[in-house]
Amino acid sequence: MASRITSLLPLALAGALSGGCREGAPPVPDAGPGPQRIILISLDTVRPDHLGVYGYARPTSPAIDRFAATAVVFDDVVAQASATLASHASILTSRIPRHHGARFAERQALGADVPTLAGLLREAGYRTVAFTGGGQMDRRFGLDRGFDEYQETRLNQNFRETAGLGIQWLRANREERVFLFLHTYEPHHPYVARGLPGLEGDYDGPLPPVIPAELLKEISFGSREIDERDLAHIVNAYDNDLRSTDDGFHRLHRFLRRQGFLDDALVVLTSDHGEELGEHGAVGWHGHTLYEELLRVPLIVKLPGGAHAGTRVAASVRSLDIAPTILDLAGVPIPEGFQGVSLLPHLAPGASPADLPALSELDAAPPRVSYRQRPWKLDGPRLFDLEGDPGESRDLASAESRRLEALDQAAEEWLGRRPPPPAERVELEDSTLEQLRALGYISRQEQP
C-alpha cells in the first residue's frame, strides 16, 4: 500500500522543528527560536466535508482553499468531544475531557492544575492573546488560563469583525512574539441564508431565511416535520454562514501576507466539532451524539517558510495533537501530561504514519465515550466498521464481540491513566446565560 502522505515536499523548515516527539518517531532537525507568530483559528461547528479543500463542490471556502494550497492538510481528524467547551479545552490542554475537567453539561471549569498551551507559550516568551465568542468559551470555564489578554466578543459578531480585532492587535504589537487564538461562532446556528455568490438558492417554502436554534431543536427532536426542500434550505443557510466566515478568514490572511507576517508564521486552522445535517435524524444540531459528522473536523497547518506546502496526510490524527505540534515547532518541551503527540514526524522524509487511536466523550451526565481505531469505532455499546459502513448504520457488536471487548478495554485503559481533576462548579452571569440561550445550549425556561 502506498504511503498515506501524498505530495510530500522536501523538508524546508531549517532549524524550526524541535525534539519533544515520542520515542521511536523519525528524527527531525533541532529547534530554533520558534516562529515569531503562532496563530490558532477555531471556526466553530465546521464540517470538513463542507469545505472545498475537503472535496465540497459548492463555493463555501475559496479563501481557505487557497490557504490550504500553501499548507499541510490533515484529511482525517477526530475531535475529543462534539460540544464547544469540552472540545476546545482538549485542543488547548491536549487532554481528553475526563482528564481536563471542563464540561458544560455539569457546569464544570478546567481543572486548576491542568497545563495549557497558552501558559506554556507564555512561559517561553510569547505574548498570549485571545478573541473568542463567549458562551461556552466564557472565561469562567478556565479557558482564559495562560492568556495575557482574553477578550470575549459579542455573540452575533461575524468572523470578519473578529479577524479585525486580531489584525488591530498584530499591527499595534508587530515586534512581539505572539500566540494569537481566534474563535468565532459564525458557522454555528442560527444560520442565515444570505444569498452569497454561488449559494443563492431558490427556496420558496415555509422556513424563514434565518434559521434559529429553537426551530432546529423542534425539527431535530420531532415536533416539526420538514421535507427535502426544507432540508436543502437549511443546508444552504449553513453553507452561507461558512462562506461569510471564509470572507473573514480572507481578511486576516490578506493582512498577514501584505504585512510580511505570513512567511515566518505558524497558522493553524481547525474547528471544535462538526454538525448533523440529517444523517442520523437531527438537523443543525450537535453535542448529543458521537457520530462521525460531529467528531470529524478540519485541520490545516501552514508551517513557517511554507514547508511541506501541498502535503495531505491521510492517517487519522486527533484534536489532542494540535497543542503538542505547536509546542514542538516553537521549541517548547511537551509536558508529560499531554495525551496527544506532535504531528511533525508525520512530515519527515519517508514517513508512513499509522492511524492514531482517538477517544472522544459526550458532554453529558453521565458521559459516554467512543473509541476509534480506524476502521473500527466503539460508540458506547455499539461497534461500527467505518470502512464498510461510513454512515454508522449497522451495529456489529454481536458479530464482532471480541473486537468490541478489545476496543472497550483500550478505552477503559485510556480513561484510567489519571484521575479526573477536582470538580470546579461554574456560576454564570446573566449575559452569558443569554448567549447560551441564543446558541441553543439552554432553553428559555432553563436556569443552570
Image (cartoon, grey):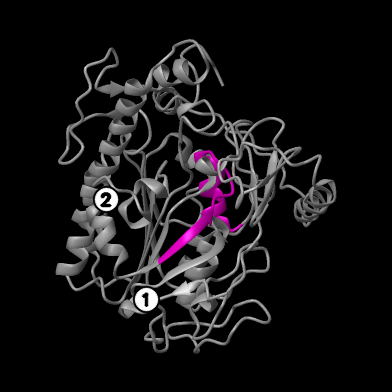
- Which of the labelled discs sits on residue 35, or is there none? 1
Q: Could you tell me if residue 210 is visible in this image?
A: yes
Measuring from the top left, give residue 40's x and y in whole percent. 39, 59
> Could you say which is closer to the camera, residue 235 or residue 337?
235
**Crowd band around label 1 with a 10 angstrom C-alpha radius: few (<14), some (14–19), many (20+):** many
Left or right: 385 in relation to 203:
right
Q: CA distance from mark 1 to mark 2?
A: 26 Å
Which residue type does callout 2 highlight?
Answer: Ser
Query: What residue appears at the point 50 percent right and 62 percent down from the top-left corner?
Result: 322
Left or right: 270 in relation to 358:
left
Measuring from the top left, give residue 405's x and y in whole percent. 83, 49
How many tags in the picture? 2
Mark 1 or 2, nearer chain start: 1
Measuring from the top left, give residue 334's x and y in whole percent. 59, 71
> Could you say which is closer to the camera, residue 293 or residue 183?
293
Magenta extent = 73-94
Q: Are marks 1 and 2 in contact (CB under 8 Å)?
A: no
Residue bearing mark 2: 61
Which residue type does callout 1 highlight?
Answer: Pro
Residue 439 among magenta residues: no
Label 2 secondary element: loop
Measuring from the top left, give residue 152's x and y in whole percent. 36, 41
**In the rendered image of this protein, does residue 427 appear above or below residue 38?**
above
